[in-house]
Amino acid sequence: MGAYSSLGDLLEEMRVLLPDPLIDGSGWERVQALAKRLPFYAIDTRFGFEMDLCDPRPAADFSVLLVPGSRLAAFYERQADEVAAGLAGPDLGRFLRKHGRDPHSLLSRTGAGVILEYDLAAHPPGEHGSPGVFIVTSGTADRQGAMLHDDPAALVAALESAAGWEPGAVDARQVERVCAAVEGSGLVLQAGVMPSRALRAVRLIVHGIGQADIAGVLERLRWCGDPSLAASALSDLEGLVRPRTGLSIDLTSQGVSPRLGLELFRPGELHRTDPVGWRTLMERLISKRWCLQAKAGALGEWPRIETFFGADAVYRVRQVVNHIKLVIDGGAIGVKGYAAMDVQRTSSGKH
């Protein structure tokens, strides 16, 4: 066995890399309570942090990426809810086994991975519920293979299975309607469920919507908010984010939820590790009073590449900001930040 028996053991030594305004105190305890339960090889893929930049508490939610056939996916397949409460839902292992090994499953046909998202900030350390499960593809209009929106019925069935919900729990017609409404304007690249939340909903994330198209898409979706507010917010950030937006919507039996997310990415090939660009964007968000200065400033300082001398090896740590999300709810705008860490072992031996 190596020097680290869990992801939490490694994070304990890398604590200095996490800015205090974003993760500190009980917020750090929440992350550690979960990370101590995850194997060290969770570093095989990127893990991430979701921060509410309007909340003064230094707390974050946490996510891991499962690639079918990976060691981490196999770890989760073995978990049973009765012995791993809150780590995996009662049906997650069955879902991963079926969809990771069946060549005809939705995951296999779309080449998708799975992101597990833990709501930590809203719960005491170690007392969170089962994670949200997101089926995630990466692609463009000319990619090979199936897309999530090609078969809404199969997508709904997969999400119900992942959540442990009975068949028919999700109104498939609502998902079909959204897929039809965004056709030609964007691609459904992510879809997820949050089984521990009170609201039973499906979240669809549609990528690639042009700024000029956003109001029309929201009207076709019959969103109950003001489409001009979303269009105006995007206009305020023109030049600082990519011209195409991700649209995050929650679907219930009543239709599209009033709460809307606009997912925004920095332009350029090196956008994730571009500290100057991210700081400039954070300054604009602060000037609009959409977020707190201390937290936005700390997120702007997140992108970096560090060399970490661990107990058993030298590690290359790449800290990235993936994107931000403008959350529009009741006419108000807030911001969430999505940061991550890529940890790569570069050499062995004590240093």
Image (cartoon, rainbow, N blue to C red):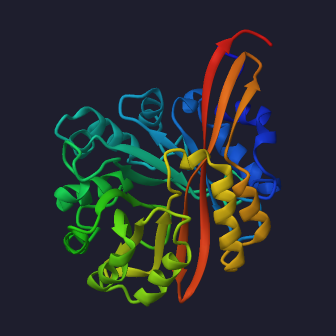
Relative to 54, say whether 141 is above or below: above
Image quadrant occupied by the N terminus: top right
Q: Please give left or right for residue 150 compared with residue 112 in the image.
A: left
The residue under the point 40% across, 45% down is 114
Seen from the viewer's position, the closer of residues 133 and 178 is 178
The residue under the point 40% across, 53% down is 134
The residue under the point 42% across, 28% down is 70
Q: Please give left or right for residue 17 compared with residue 323 in the image.
A: right
Q: Please give left or right for residue 221 compared with residue 211 in the image.
A: left
Relative to 200, say whether 67 is above or below: above
How many marks on residues?
0
Q: In which quarter of the image is residue 250?
A: bottom left
Q: Please give left or right for residue 155 compared with residue 223 in the image.
A: left
**Residue 8 spot, x, y in % from top left:** 70, 36
Does residue 151 appear anywhere in the picture?
yes
Does residue 122 appear anywhere in the picture?
no
Q: Quadrant of residue 180?
A: bottom left
**Residue 332 spot, x, y in % from top left:** 58, 85
Image quadrant occupied by the C terminus: top right
Residue that lies at the very extreme toward the front in this rendered image: 239
**Residue 67 spot, x, y in % from top left:** 40, 35
**Residue 90 spot, x, y in % from top left:** 42, 48
The residue under the point 50% across, 78% down is 235
Seen from the viewer's position, the closer of residues 75 and 103 is 103
